[in-house]
Image: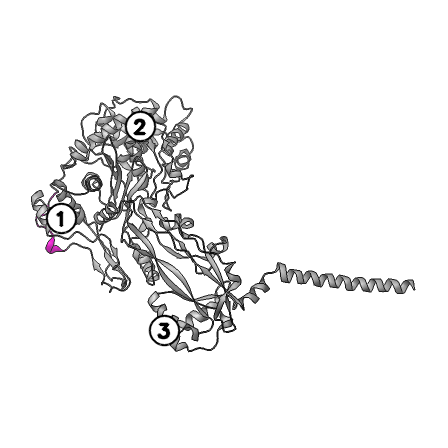
């Protein structure tokens, strides 16, 4: 009997354990595992995402630049599709049967595909097309619309700043709980930097459906629905009139212009040329336009203002002077002799002939190489340093406070830190303890291994204009409620304000009597510095950095024109025109002739790609010789130039131009090369720029 009772207990225990296991399994299936709930719900309830309206973008004057336009995605739930008239649906959509089956057959290959979940069959169907489809949609079970918005750009300029949006890639989907397949995300520019603020929050609603997939009512009285929250609007700091002017003047040139308001750090204009029309990268032609832009050998998608860095040349000399003054190794009246070169032993760093420099003001005025080589040497070889490496590190530390050689803090993605070499670089080049100050003396005049971006150059000018105080450069006004915004905090470089006064006076003399003497800008009170960046791949680059007015600075500008050579003949005049445009809004007097010449100056002949045709021209980009450049200037006098301007349309403001609106016909690709019939005769040297008392400082030559 005892054995029988034990067997009964064991058998009962086994059944109890099996029952418990079944109950636990049912609990996990019905409560913990939501996949079965989702499968059941998909047969009775349809989840419809409600996409928020992306935030609008305005300029500093409240002009609308970017808004949204509704479009529709045609969605399907594969297991709910019943036999339908394929030809009729294709006619309604305006697509071919081949296109339909190509899209349909591709769906199962997508990651995350499920026959029970909605899939996107066709994207961005225009509202007028969807209106035709909607009337007959009941005849196509398993098909339903999903409303979205696409970006509409009301301007053809500032493409590098505005950026563009595109579909989220798989990495973004895998690393974010927000994005799903087919969602749009900012790819570049402020669309990318402010993605989280612009995108808003997705909403959702649940609809009951019948066996035919037809919506029959709301699920649970919409208590589980969630409204979409629109993205925040942005207001840019850009002056779009100035931005368009800068792009217009940079047509047919490679380079960059950056303009900053010194007292706030707000970016007024940022141009990288060649550039592109932001309207090309939206709508159904986006893919083809992107392919054309990506394959362009001049790289219009590359933002030179942020990511390209150049040897700053002589525009670095004001910073070198400030460091020397702060370190106490020189005074405003320190004298260093110059006899056509900086000489020490066999070393020669050539300089142009000019009057002797008995102060830092005259050294800046004449851009004396010897003077600033001496400053650099005594800075890094001070007795307070144990060795040269310590001196160079301290010099580099000063430059980092000007945001040189470190990651640039700005709200436009993609800035380069430039490059400021340290002792490690020269240990690799020469061997540890086998180099001296004279080995790297070219750093004192902005040459050698040093590199600065156009944004860093303009930012440095803003710091000097503001006597050492600065805000990080930014292109967007602070968002509402953003208390931690880094662009509203003022910073200061570790240089006393009194040291800025002689440096600024020297920069004023550069424009009035020195290496960048200009006509017609007296009322602007410009302080600036010319420069020539050495280019191992061709002609040197023309640089000029400045700010104005001297005692109440409102704008700081850096201009870099690649392969132009003459800092005082090209970059400096363009900078003066940009400053005048911002301060006075109109170009008058002698500046009209200068504007005419700079607008028509061509440093490259290149085709323009227009949308929607986007045909690729067969002709290649043409190089421009020195004789070609000189022939574009003529000696007709300011009055003759002013009359010529009245009869001449200024160059197209963008190498890439798209007609406003997707329905307008395309224009065949054309060249922006000036028409010989409208080019004034008798080419000669520009008459609106006084030649400097001596040639521009040549690149240093180490012997």
* 15 sits left or right of 676 in the view: right
Q: Quick one: SS at disc 1?
A: helix
Residue 230 coordinates in the image, percent (x, y)? 41, 53
State which tag comes first along the sequence, 1 or 3. 3
The quadrant of the image that shows the C terminus is top left
Residue holding disc 1: 631
Residue holding disc 2: 322
Residue holding disc 3: 92
Question: How far apart, in angstroms, are the residues tagged by discs 3 and 2?
Answer: 71 Å
Q: Nearer the viewer, residue 271 or 194?
A: 194
State which tag comes first along the sequence, 2 or 1. 2
Q: Main secondary structure of the magenta part?
A: loop
Q: Residue at x 52, y 58 (%)?
A: 224
Q: Residue at x 41, y 41 (%)?
A: 482
Which residues, given as a range, are shown in magenta?
675-685
Residue 558 coordinates in the image, percent (x, y)? 27, 40
Q: Nearer the viewer, mark 2 or mark 1?
A: 2
Question: How far apart, in angstroms, are the residues tagged by discs 2 and 1?
Answer: 41 Å
Residue lying farthest to the front in this orientation: 221
């Amino acid at each position: 009997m005892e054995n029988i009772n034990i067997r009964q207990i064991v058998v009962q225990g086994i059944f109890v354990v099996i029952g418990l296991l079944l109950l636990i399994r049912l609990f996990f299936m019905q409560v913990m595992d939501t996949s079965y709930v989702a499968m059941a719900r998909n047969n009775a309830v349809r989840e419809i995402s409600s996409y928020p309206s992306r935030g609008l973008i305005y300029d500093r004057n409240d002009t609308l630049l970017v808004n949204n336009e509704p479009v529709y995605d045609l969605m399907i739930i594969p297991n709910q599709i019943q036999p339908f008239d394929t030809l009729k649906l294709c006619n309604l959509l305006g697509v071919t049967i081949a296109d339909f089956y190509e899209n349909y057959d591709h769906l199962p290959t997508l990651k995350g595909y499920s026959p029970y979940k909605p899939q996107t069959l066709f994207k961005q169907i225009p509202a007028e097309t969807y209106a035709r489809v909607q009337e007959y949609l009941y005849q196509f079970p398993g098909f339903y619309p999903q409303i979205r918005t696409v970006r509409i750009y009301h301007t053809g300029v500032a493409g590098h700043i505005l950026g563009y949006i595109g579909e989220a890639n798989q990495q973004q989907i895998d690393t974010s709980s927000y994005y799903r397949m087919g969602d749009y995300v900012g790819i570049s520019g402020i669309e990318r930097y402010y993605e989280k603020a612009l995108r808003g929050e997705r909403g959702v609603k649940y609809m009951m459906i019948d066996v035919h997939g037809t919506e029959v009512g709301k699920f649970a009285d919409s208590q589980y629905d969630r409204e979409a929250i629109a993205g925040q609007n942005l207001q840019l700091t850009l002056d779009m009139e100035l931005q368009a002017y800068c792009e217009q003047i940079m047509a047919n040139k490679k380079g960059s212009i950056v303009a900053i308001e010194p007292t706030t750090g707000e970016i007024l204009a940022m141009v990288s040329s060649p550039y592109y029309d932001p309207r090309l990268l939206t709508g159904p032609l986006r893919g083809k336009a992107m392919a054309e832009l990506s394959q362009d050998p001049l790289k219009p998608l590359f933002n030179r203002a942020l990511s390209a860095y150049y040897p700053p040349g002589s525009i670095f000399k004001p910073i070198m002077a400030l460091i020397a003054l702060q370190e106490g190794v020189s005074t405003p009246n320190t004298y260093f002799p110059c006899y056509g070169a900086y000489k020490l032993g066999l070393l020669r760093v050539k300089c142009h002939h000019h009057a002797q420099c008995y102060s830092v003001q005259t050294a800046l005025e004449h851009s004396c190489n010897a003077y600033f080589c001496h400053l650099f040497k005594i800075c890094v070889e001070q007795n307070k340093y144990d060795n040269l490496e310590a001196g160079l590190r301290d010099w580099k530390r000063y430059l980092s406070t000007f945001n040189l050689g470190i990651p640039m803090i700005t709200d436009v993605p993609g800035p380069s830190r430039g490059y400021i070499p340290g002792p490690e670089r020269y240990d690799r080049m020469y061997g540890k303890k086998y180099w001296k100050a004279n080995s790297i003396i070219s750093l004192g005049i902005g040459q050698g291994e040093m590199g600065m971006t156009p944004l860093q150059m303009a930012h440095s000018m803003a710091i000097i204009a503001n006597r050492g105080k600065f805000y990080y450069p930014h292109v967007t006004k602070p968002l509402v409620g953003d208390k931690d915004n880094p662009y509203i905090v003022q910073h200061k470089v570790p240089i006393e304000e009194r040291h800025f006064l002689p440096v600024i006076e020297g920069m004023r003399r550069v424009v009035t009597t020195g290496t960048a003497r200009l006509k017609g800008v007296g009322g602007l009170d410009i302080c600036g510095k010319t420069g020539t960046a050495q280019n191992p791949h061709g002609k040197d680059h023309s640089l000029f950095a400045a700010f104005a007015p001297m005692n109440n600075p409102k704008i700081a500008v850096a201009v870099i024109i690649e392969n132009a050579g003459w800092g005082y003949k090209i970059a400096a005049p363009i900078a003066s025109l940009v400053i005048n445009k911002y301060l006075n809004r109109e170009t008058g007097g002698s500046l009209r002739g200068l504007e005419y010449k700079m607008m028509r100056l061509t440093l490259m002949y290149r085709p323009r790609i227009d949308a929607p045709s986007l045909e690729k021209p067969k002709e290649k980009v043409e190089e421009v010789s020195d004789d070609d450049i000189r022939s574009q200037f003529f000696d007709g006098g300011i009055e003759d130039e002013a009359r010529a301007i009245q009869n001449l349309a200024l160059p197209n403001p963008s190498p890439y131009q798209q007609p406003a609106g997707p329905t307008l016909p395309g224009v065949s690709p054309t060249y922006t090369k000036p028409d010989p019939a409208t080019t004034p005769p008798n080419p000669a040297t520009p008459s609106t720029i006084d030649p400097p008392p001596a040639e521009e400082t040549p690149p240093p030559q180490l012997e």
